[in-house]
Amino acid sequence: MSLAAWVRRARTPAPAPVKREYAFFEPADLFDMDVKDDPEASPVLCCTGDPAGASAFNALWLKRIATTGRYAAAVSVRGQGGTPAAEGGLEARAHDLVQAAVTVPRQTVLIGHKEGAAWAALAAGRYPAAGLVLVSPQKVPKQPPTPVGGPPVLIVVAESETQSKEVQAVAAAYGTAPLTFAGSPDDVFKGAGAEGLLDAILSWLARKD
Amino acid sequence: MQEYSSQAAYDRGEAVCVIGAGASGLIAVKNLRENGFEVDCYERDTVLGGLWNPQNQHSPLYPNTHLVTSRSQTEIPDFPMPDDWPDYPSAAQMLAYLTSYAKHFGLSEHIWYGSEISHVEPVEGSRFEVVVKPAAGNAARRLRYAAVIIATGHHWAPNLPSYPGLDQFRGTVLHSSQLKDPSRLRGKHVLVVGGGNSGADIACEAAVNAASCVHSVRRGSWHLPKYLGGEPADYALARLNSRPKYLRRFLTDRLLKGPARLAARMGVAADGSPSEEEPVRNGRYMEHVGDGSIQRRGEIARFDGFDAVFVDGSEMRPDLVVLATGYRPKFTSVEPRLLGIEGDSPYPKLYARMFSPRMETLAVAGLVEPGVGVLPIVHWQTHAIAHWLLVRKSDPERAANFRLQVRSEAEQDTARPAGSSPRHQLAVDAEEYLASLGRIIDTLEQEPAK
Ligand SMILES: Cc1cc2nc3c(=O)[nH]c(=O)nc-3n(C[C@H](O)[C@H](O)[C@H](O)COP(=O)(O)OP(=O)(O)OC[C@H]3O[C@@H](n4cnc5c(N)ncnc54)[C@H](O)[C@@H]3O)c2cc1C
Ligand SMILES: NC(=O)c1ccc[n+]([C@@H]2O[C@H](COP(=O)([O-])OP(=O)(O)OC[C@H]3O[C@@H](n4cnc5c(N)ncnc54)[C@H](OP(=O)(O)O)[C@@H]3O)[C@@H](O)[C@H]2O)c1
C-alpha cells in the first residue's frame, strides 16, 4: 500500500464494526498422531462469495488444510452466514477480511473464492499476506492494489472459465498464468472437483513455504 | 576499548542491527525482514513494547494512561487494531496490540532481550561494530553489521527543572514517570508542574483521587478535547486536510471555535494560533478546571520548607509535587556527532528526521513528535529506511541522487521555526512530514532507469 493510499483511508470513515462469524480448525483438532502443527507453515484464511460464508469451508477445506499442519480458518463477512448485515460494499468486506487476518496467530495466506477473491485482492493491498490465492475470481477491480510485502499470488479457475475476459484481466493484472481445475466454479466445497482444486492449492502452498 | 572482550567481533555480514524493541524497533524489524534483510534486535529490558510495557523497568506509564491519539490514527497501517476496541485504547490494550504484532510477524525470534547496546562504532567504511553490554559475569559480545537502526525512544531521561529551595523541600517530589501507582495521590495535597499531556492527565487523576490539586504551568498551551464534531478530534482535523486549501482554514476554525472559547474562558489558551506544537488532548481537564477540582497557577518561584511559592507571590503547602516536565533525548551508545548532535543541545539533527548526516548506514526511527499517532509515521520511516538500504546496495548512482534529495528535504525542514520551547525540537507538522516521507519513498521505489 502506498503512503498516499493509507493517508486517504485513514481519513475516510471506517466501516461500522460487526461481530464476525469464524470457522477454524487447528492441526491438534484432528486428533491424528501423524499430523503435527508446523510452525514454519503459514496459516490459511478463506472467504467465499457464497452466502453461506465461513461454514461453506467446514465440509472439506478446513480439515484438509489442517492435515498439512496449518492453522485453517474461514470468515463470514458482513451479511454472510452468521455475520450480521451492515452498510458498506467491497471496501467494507475487505475491511472484514483484514480484521479477520490480524486475529490469526501468524502471518496468513488469504484465499478468496468468487467475489471473495475481490475482497482478498483488496485486503492484500493493506495487509502483508503470506500468500494470495484467488479461486474463480469475480468482481476484482480492474487495477487491484499491489499486494503489500510482495506475497506470491496464485490464480485457480475452472476449465470452463479460462476463456472468460474477467479471468484473463485478473491474470494480467497479477502477471501470472492461472492454474485450472476440473469441475464447476460453483461446486468447490465438496466432491471430486473440490478435492482436486484443494490439492493443487496445497501443493502450491507447500512449494511457497 | 580494552574493557571489551579480546575476542574478535562476530561478523553478521549483510544483517542489520536494530536497537530497542519498543513500538519503533518492532516496526523496524518487521519492515526490514519484509524487504529481505536479516535482522538482530537488541533490547536492554526483558520485555518488548518499550514504554507501553509496565514491566519495562523504566516505563513512564502513570495511573490510567490511555492513548491521546485515536485508534484509527494510531494503528500501524498494515496491521489495524481490532475494530471493536474503543476510540482511545488503554495502555494495556496498546501493549496487547504490540505483542500480537510481534507474534503475528514472528519478530520475537529476532530479538535478544536483556541486551543493552553500550557502544556502536563505525568500522570498515560503512559497517558498524556493536558492543552488547555484558550480563553479570559474561564477557561483552561484539558483532559487526552492515547497518544500524536506533529505536531507543526519547522518553527515558526525565527533564527536571531546578528551583531555589527544592533540595530542602519537606514534601515528596516525583517526576511524572515515577508516579506509577494511583494510591500515591489519595488524600494528598498535590501540586502538578508542567502543561503537557502528562501534566494534564495527572492533574485529572489528582482531581478525583487527591485531597486537592494545583496545576502549575509557565504558559498556556493548545488544548483539544478528545472529540470534535462527533468524531475523534485527531481524525476530524486530519480529514479536513483532504479538503481544498481555501476551505480548510475556514472549516478548521469552525471546528475549533467552541474548544477555543472554552480554553479562553478557563485561562488555559496559548498565545497565538494553533501551531505545530503538540496539543494537549484531554476531554476531562476543562471540566475539572470548571468545577474547581483543578486550580491553575503560574510558574513556581521557589520552595521554602514545606511550601511552594509561586511567581505571583501566592503559596501552598503540597504533600506531593509531581514534575510532569517532560523528557530529554539521550543517546549514549553512539558518538553524538554521527547523529548531528553538536554543542550543548541534546537534540540530533538528522536528514529527514531519520538518516545520520554522517553515515549512510545509520538511521534513527521514531525520533519525532508529530502531534498525531507516532506508529504510522514510524512505519513509513522504516519502510523508507529499508528501501534506502536496498537501493544503496543495488544502484549506487540512484543512491547518490537520493542523498541529495534527502539533504534538500532536510534543509526545507530546518528553515521553519520549530515551536517556542526547546522541547519542540522534535515537533514536526505531520502533514508536511508525511508529504516529505511520501516523496522520499517515491524516489526510492521508482524503477531504476534502464
Ligand atoms: C506517557 C506517554 C503517552 C504516550 N501516548 C501516545 C499516544 O497516545 N499516541 C502516540 O502515538 N504516541 C504516544 N506516545 C509516544 C510514544 O513515544 C510512542 O507511541 C511509541 O511508544 C514510541 O516507541 P519507541 O519504540 O520509539 O520508544 P520506546 O517505547 O521508548 O522504546 C524504546 C526501547 O528501546 C530500549 N532501549 C533503550 N536504550 C537501549 C539500548 N542502549 N540498548 C538496547 N535497548 C535499549 C528500551 O528499553 C525500550 O524498550 C506517548 C508517550 C508517553 C511517554
Ligand atoms: N496519554 C498519552 O497518550 C500521553 C500522555 C503523556 C504524554 N504523552 C506524550 O509523551 C510525550 C511527553 O509528554 P509530557 O507531557 O511528559 O512532556 P512534554 O510534552 O515535554 O511537556 C512538558 C511540560 O513541562 C513544562 N516544563 C518543562 N520544563 C519546565 C520548567 N523548567 N519549568 C516549568 N515547566 C516546565 C513544559 O512547558 P513548556 O511548554 O513551556 O516547555 C511542558 O508544559 C509527548 O509526546 C506526549 O504527547 C502522551
Image: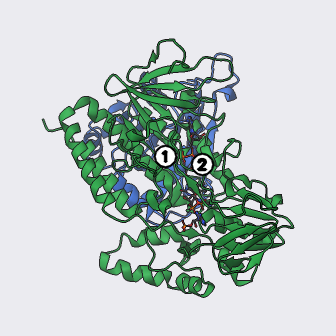
Q: Give me the C-alpha separation between circle 2 and circle 1.
A: 52 Å
Q: Residue at x 54, y 57 (%)?
A: A78
Of tags 2 and 1, the one toward the viewer is: 2
Q: Is residue B212 left or right of residue B254?
A: right
Q: Amino acid at mark 1?
A: Thr
Answer yes or no: are tags 2 and 1 on the same subunit. Answer: no
Q: Colour of chain A?
A: blue
Secondary structure at badge 1 equals: strand
Which corner quadrant of the image does residue B164 belong to?
Answer: bottom right
The answer to which of B109 and A96 lies nearer the viewer is B109
Query: Looking at numbered disc 2 in the image, what kind of residue is underneath it?
Result: Ala
Name the residue rendered at 62%, 38% in the picture. Answer: B48
Residue occupied by mark 2: B157
Q: Chain of mark 1?
A: A
Q: Colour of chain B?
A: green
So how many labels did they put on this image? 2
Q: Foreground residue, B182 or B359? A: B359
